Image (cartoon, helix red, strand yellow):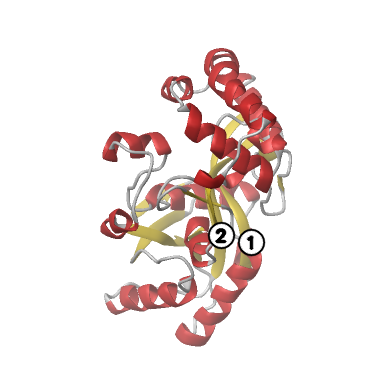
Amino acid sequence: MEIVLIREKMEITATPIRTRYIDRNEDFVSESINSLKKKIKEGFEIKNGDFLVVSEKFIATSEDNFVDESLANPKFWAYFTYYLSKYGWGYVLGPLLGTRKDRVKNLRKMPKTETLKHKQIVIENVGLIYALKPASEGGIDLTNVPGTYASLLPKNPENSAKKLHKKIKEELNLDLTVMVIDTDATYRFFNWYVTALPIAIDGIISKIGVFGYILGKFGKRLNQGGLCGATPLAIVGNENYKKYPLKTLLYIANLSDTSQVPYTKSIHDLMKKYNTFEITVDVLKEMEHSPLVIVKCE
């Protein structure tokens, strides 16, 4: 459990809810309900208006919204974006825009074959404007996904959140605010909030691909913004959340993301831990998972 005091003089408490690893096509709603019931039986109190923050990967896995990157056939733009990421971002743009040294180092070491296939998948599924970003392109994720698969964003995060909210009301008689988040970042640029993702909640400028990332980096360089943290993709249910400014909702999203049970957050962490860029379902089932987080604002 983590409690943080923020400017609005509220205590925001984030409590991760552990679940088992669900396989592709398994119902994330049922697993969510079962995990919440178990937490309540342990004595944890959940109230109307509390936030239930849900990882987008949990939903995407349930939807089997995966693509097999081993089947990709890289074309010209995949090669272009690979060399741009490795050399352009790794040696020029990354250092110029203040990208962390460890991430710059990872860009310089990125494997050619796997990256070319990944870039092609990004181009085919979300577009070139996202593939121009050096990493975490368009929400297409390689970590904590089995084999050579990549996870796409949920097909409709808002509808999935509504489905979960409705079922919680029926099964647990609780009216929660359900927020779906992605680890990929939202940034502040002067008075605007931007992301490199193709979707985000109202108030965050999305669908601008790599330019969301560049604006965020410039915001930090100019001391007029910078990283805010995880991006809310959808928010539904109890309308208690409407009394909070976007800044607070972003804080809740990022606190939830950082409160989850530790697991490999990047493909490079995966390589260090398992000496492979691939991961099996058996390994995933051995890991601890907390794709749900209850957040209380008091």
Indicate left or right for 40 with 133 as reference. Answer: left
Q: Which residue is mark 1?
A: 155
Q: Residue at 41% across / 23% down in the picture?
A: 102
- Position of 103 relative to 129 (above/below): above
Depth check: give the residue in front, 152 or 222.
152
Q: Residue at 28% across / 75% down in the picture?
A: 43
- The amino acid beneath tag 1 is Lys
Residue 129 figure quarter: top right
- The amino acid beneath tag 2 is Asn
Indicate left or right for 88 with 209 as reference. Answer: left
Give the percent coordinates (x, y) of residue 85: 57, 24
Residues at badges 1 and 2 in contact (C-beta under 8 Å)? yes
Name the mark on residue 112: none
Mark nearest the camera among 1 and 2 is: 2
Q: Residue at 40% across / 66% down in the picture?
A: 22
Depth check: give the residue in front, 215 or 270.
270
Give the percent coordinates (x, y) of residue 131: 64, 35
Q: Which residue is mark 2?
A: 65
Depth check: give the residue in front, 266 or 178.
266
Q: Is residue 236 visible?
A: yes
Indicate left or right for 268 with 237 as reference. Answer: left
